[in-house]
Image (cartoon, grey):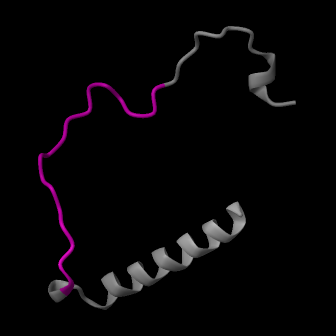
Amino acid sequence: MGRDEHRKSKNSFLAQTPKNQLTDGIDVEFAEEFADHDDKEAQARSRAADKRAKRRSN
């Protein structure tokens, strides 16, 4: 039995992001021409993870 199974209150809410969190206002885009080896490796890992997740969900 987990901890949540003992709680009877239905209005308990835990925010995932603090409401007072400020943004730096910077929007970052990916440009293929400026990508280095680490960027391309990260993209390949991301695609492989997406494929694994898709196979598990089917």
Task: From the image, give the main secondary structure of the stretch colored magenta.
Answer: loop
**Residue 57 percent across, percent down from the top left:** 69, 61
User: Which quarter of the figure is the C terminus placed in?
Assistant: bottom right
Q: Residue at x 17, y 78 (%)?
A: 31
Left or right of 36 on screen, residue 57: right
The part of the chain drawn in magenta is: 15-32
Q: Residue at x 40, y 79 (%)?
A: 42
- Point out the residue furthest to the right here: 1
Q: Residue at x 22, y 85 (%)?
A: 35
The answer to whether residue 6 is above or below residue 33 is above
**Residue 7 percent across, percent down from the top left:** 74, 14
Q: Residue at x 14, y 46 (%)?
A: 24
**Residue 2 percent across, percent down from the top left:** 81, 31
- Point out the residue furthest to the bottom here: 37
> How many labels sit on residues?
0
Q: Does residue 55 belong to the magenta stretch?
A: no
- Point out the residue furthest to the front here: 58
Left or right of 31 on screen, residue 42: right
Q: Does residue 28 belong to the magenta stretch?
A: yes
User: Which quarter of the figure is the N terminus placed in?
Assistant: top right
Residue placed most toward the observer, 31 or 16: 31
**Residue 6 percent across, percent down from the top left:** 80, 17
The answer to whether residue 15 is above or below residue 39 is above
